[in-house]
Amino acid sequence: MELPENSIKPLQRLSVPILREYLANEFAPVMNPPFKGEVSFERLVDDIVFMCFFVGNDFLPHLPSLDIRDGALDYLFNVYRRLLPGLGGYLTDHGGVVNLDRVDVILAQVGGIEDYVFEMKHKNEENDKARRAQYTNRNKSHGNKLPTGGIVNAPQQAFQNRGRAGRILAEKEAAALKKGMASSDGDIKLQRGHSAKEELRKKLKGKTSAGDNAKAADSLKQLLSNGSKEDATKEDNGEDTATSKRNAPKIPAAEEKSTAAKDADDMFGESGGESDNNIGDTDMEEEKTEQEKEEDKAAIEEAKKNIKEKIKNMERAKLDDFSKNVEDNVRLHEPGWKDRYYTDKCKADDVKNHGGREHLFRSYVQGLCWVMKYYYVGCPSWKWYYPFHYGPFASDLRNIERFQKDCEFELSEPFKPVEQLLSVLPDDSSHAVPKEARWLMGDDESPIIDYYPSDVPCDPNGKAMPWLWVVLLPFIDEERLLGALLPTMKKWTPKELLCNSRGMDDGYVFLHKDHPMSKETMFILDSKDEYTKDKFRLAEKDIARISCFFGFLRKPLSHEIYGIDEDSVVPLPATSSKISRTSDLFSDSIEPNQAVCFAFTEPTIESHRSEILVGALLPSCVLTDEDRRIRRPRLNRGGDTIANM
């Protein structure tokens, strides 16, 4: 955040303890359900996490009737609070296990309101379209924007035709009226351009005060007095008095301009088109400069506001155009929506090509269980993925406990680095894979060229906003991918083969030589062969308990390390000169390198339990009574949805 380019980015901070407080307050009515078994707030939090899967995540699409923007989470939480006491237990168990028979009850409630949800959603969308059309028409008919300050009954053109001073007066007059006060120059009318300047000049010049006249008289007396003294002195010295008088400063017949007159000339220039470049003292010039700065600042802010408004209008017009051109063939708000959904070309092809409706339902339930395991235990299977672009309806997911046996996963092996890159990168990024394999991503003769389309089809799916469209990228078949890649590996360089390999362990740990943990584990590096094969268990040292760092360490083999010497230097990154910064980050090389390295293996995975660790101290509560007051969410501009909650 020290870099200037990050200084203007808003930072949103989420406090987990405060979130826990809100959840505890939200679910207080069911904090102690009548279960025979364990009752725990931590288990309730697990259920909340699970219910969030229904609105979509990185691995699964959302159910069509549950949209997070339309209050889907609020609805799910309401259903959960109402049904939990009669479920006989939580939706999930320790270790990310899902109880499908209880989840089935929740889905039945969601499925029962889908008709009404789609109908209400369409109604709200139509109301929103009408509102935007009304807004657009109103802007076209008026097309005027009043100046800042709230001047009313003055057309935009009249305001723009004023000179600079006229606009400033208009702003000040409006500000005074807004505060309920009369303007100090209430008799000054808001006129256009030059006429406004002339009137103000006359009024300011006419306000010559007695104080200004007195100052002018004193100045004249002082000059005359000084002149008399100088004449007397010169006469005593034998100088020609007449000559001295000719050289004395001339006093104009007309009195010097008053301060008010100077103000008028400073702002408008001399009347009759003349200009006096010597008007005003230094203080007046500085005051004028500050005033101009304030005016310029206000003008810049107004310009920014106008630009933002124009961009907003352009985006709104673009979305309106998308909305007009998007054809909704499914029409979820009309009877027969489910049949139309599954026979729509994109959906029908997606379902047919990947196993049919029953496989769609099974895969979605598998996905719910896979994601829960993934979050709480770790990846349960490296081979599983959701093979569809669309989610099923909640009303289709009935009796899902029949898929319980299908939710047992086999871990298998993950893709190697290059295989993973070939699975996710487009043709434009082929430079990231070994040279001999790049043709697979761009050559028409490639056996997997269909995995790298130049044009990716998108299904609007009835949505006007492009970011909500479904991107129909092809799914990767592992056997086809590896079969095409394997022959190219014969021509890879040793370095490329090394880049595609996995390490002997889970990774490496780098510590500064003065770090407390490195001092406690340095004996591993000092040993000869004892810890090259056998691994040291960190739990045997107190440092693991203090640092909460567990696992196994061993001494790196000779080909795994680079020796440290006194001349070793970590150079600056190649782009360091292009990085703008306010600190000395990346400004100096790191020398000498004083890091120590251990090969690291993660600790053995044990069964996860959702409970507060022994000895943990929870933060004090910070929510006030007002914070705890539960409010009904205002959804869709008050149009409501999700079966009226």
Image (cartoon, rainbow, N blue to C red):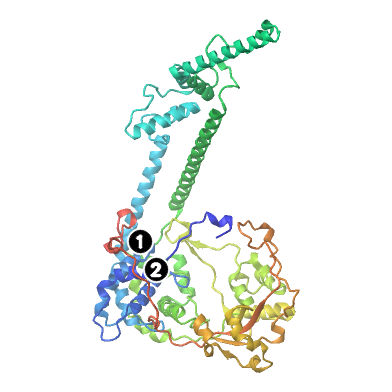
Binning the other alpha carbons within 10 Å of mark 1 as few (below 14), some (14 to 19) or many (20 upward) gives some
According to the picture, the residue beneath numbered tag 2 turns out to be 55
Above or below: residue 53 compared with residue 522: above
Q: Is residue 177 left or right of residue 493?
A: left
Which dot marks residue 471?
none
Task: Identify the residue at horizontal 51%, vertical 66% (top origin).
Answer: 472
Element marked by disc 1: helix
Percent x, y of residue 6: 55, 57
Front-most of residues 33 and 471: 33
Q: For residue 442, say whether it is visible.
A: no
Q: Is residue 127 left or right of residue 82?
A: right
Position of the C terminus, as image quadrant, is bottom left
Above or below: residue 430 compared with residue 167: below
Element marked by disc 2: helix
Does label 2 or label 1 sit earlier along the sequence? 2
Marks 2 and 1 sit apart, C-alpha to C-alpha, by 10 Å
Percent x, y of residue 587: 67, 61
According to the picture, the residue beneath numbered tag 1 turns out to be 70
Percent x, y of residue 176: 36, 32
Above or below: residue 52 compared with residue 527: above
Binning the other alpha carbons within 10 Å of mark 2 as few (below 14), some (14 to 19) or many (20 upward) gives some
Query: Picture quarter containing residue 452?
Result: bottom right
Looking at this rendering, what residue extends furthest in the right direction?
A: 567
Front-most of residues 370 and 199: 199
Tag 2 near tag 1, CB within 8 Å: no
Report the number of discs.
2
Front-most of residues 615 and 531: 615
Q: Amino acid at mark 2?
A: Val
Q: For residue 99, say whether it is visible.
A: yes
Q: Amino acid at mark 1?
A: Asp
Looking at this rendering, what residue extends furthest in the front direction?
A: 236
